[in-house]
Amino acid sequence: MTKKKSKKILFITFDLSGYYDCILDELKMQYTDVDFYNLADYKNVPYVNLNQRLKSFYYKKVKKLKLKNFYKYNPIIQEIANKKYDLTLIVRPDLFFDSQLKVLRKNSTTLLAYYHDSINNISRKKDVIHFFDKVYSYEKIDVKNYNLNFIPNFIYIKKNDKKKNFTKPSFFTIISKDYRFNSLLKVASYLKNKNYDYKFLVHSNKKQPVNDIIDFIQERKNNDQVLEYINQHSIIVDIHKFNIQDGLTFRVFESIFLEKKLITSNSDIKNYNFYNPNNIFIIEDFDAIDIPETFISSPYEKIPNKIYHKYHYSYWLKTILGTF
C-alpha cells in the first residue's frame, strides 16, 4: 500500500448526485489529513430582520449576488478560519462571496478551482478567477478566453456488477425540466414512432401534467439510482445544454465506463480521442432526427485502455494536483 503524503487538504464541492465521492475517496487515500464540505448539504438561513432583507435586495439587484448564500456557507468559513491548508480544491467557488474567498485564499498555500459549468452559464465564475493559483474548466471557450486550464469531466463509477445483455435496443436519459425539454420530446417522439423502447425522466420541482411520451419526477435521483436505470437500457441519450455550454456531461463518461452506445446533441464530442462513430451518434438537428439502424444494432467497440485511463477520476485528480 502506498504511503500517504503528510499534507493537509481542503476539498469543497457542490454535489447533489455524488459525482465527486470518488474524488474525496481518492484524496483520503493519498493524504493524511483531508477536510471536506459539500455545499449542497447546507440549507438556507432565514433572514432575521428587515435590515438583512434590504441588504439581500441590494446584493441581488446591484451586485448580482445572493446574500442567502453568504449566510448559508459562512459556517464553513468560520470552521476553517484558524486552519492552514497545504492545498484547497473548490468546485463552484462562485457560490462564495469575495470576503469568504479571501479567507480561503489566506489559509491555503495552493488554491485550485474546477469549473464544470461555463462562464456563459454562471457569469460570476469569471469574477473569482483571480483568487486562485489555477482554475481548471471543462469548457474549451472559457479556457481560451480566460486563460484557464482545460480538463473534461471524468469517469466517476468505481464498479458495476449489473452488466446485462440486451435482446433489443432500449434508450434512457434523465434531465431537468428546462429549455432542452422540447428537444427531448422530439427524440422521444422519434423513438416512439420507430417502436423502440425507451425511458426518459424529466425532473421538476413542481408537479407537471401527465405526458404520454416522457415521465416527470419530482424527487431528484442520485447516481446510484440513475445507474440502476442505465443498467436496464442499452443506449444512453445525452441532451447537453446547447448554446450555453459544450463541456462533456457525465452521461458521456457513464457510456464509456459501462460500454454503452451514446446518442448526444454535443457535436464537439468529435474532437475527443475516444470518439468513434460506431459508438456515438450526434443529433445535428432535432427537427430531422434520423438514427441509422446499423448504429443501433452494431456492437459497441471498446475504447483502448490507454485512452480510457485518461478519463478516469484518478487521472483527473492526478492532472489537477500535478506533483503535489
Image (spheres, rainbow, N blue to C red):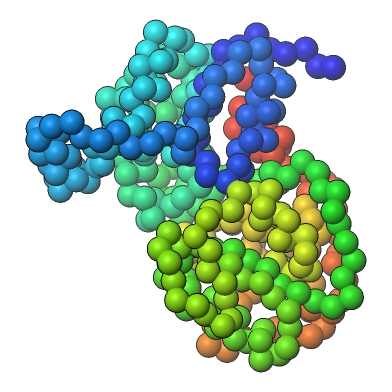
Q: Which image quarter is the C terminus in?
A: top right
Residue 313: name its quadrant: top right
The image position of residue 61, as x and y in percent, is 15, 48
- Residue positioned 71% across, 72% down in the render: 171
For the image shown, how many numbered marks are present on the structure? 0
User: Is residue 128 in sight in this rendering?
Assistant: no
Residue 156: name its quadrant: top right
The image position of residue 208, as x and y in percent, is 44, 71
On screen, residue 224 versus residue 152, left or right, reads: right
- Residue positioned 42% across, 29% down in the render: 132
The image position of residue 133, as x and y in percent, is 45, 27
- Residue positioned 46% across, 55% down in the render: 141
User: Is residue 121 in sight in this rendering?
Assistant: yes
| Residue furthest bottom in the image | 193
Q: Indicate whether 164 appears above or below 108.
A: below
On screen, residue 147 versus residue 22, left or right, reads: left
Q: Indicate whether 76 appears above or below 185.
A: above
The image position of residue 129, as x and y in percent, is 38, 36
Residue 197: name its quadrant: bottom right
In terms of depth relative to the viewer, which is nearer, 60 or 45? Answer: 45
- Residue positioned 59% across, 53% down in the render: 221
On screen, residue 176 versus residue 156, left or right, reads: left
Q: Which image quarter is the N terminus in?
A: top right
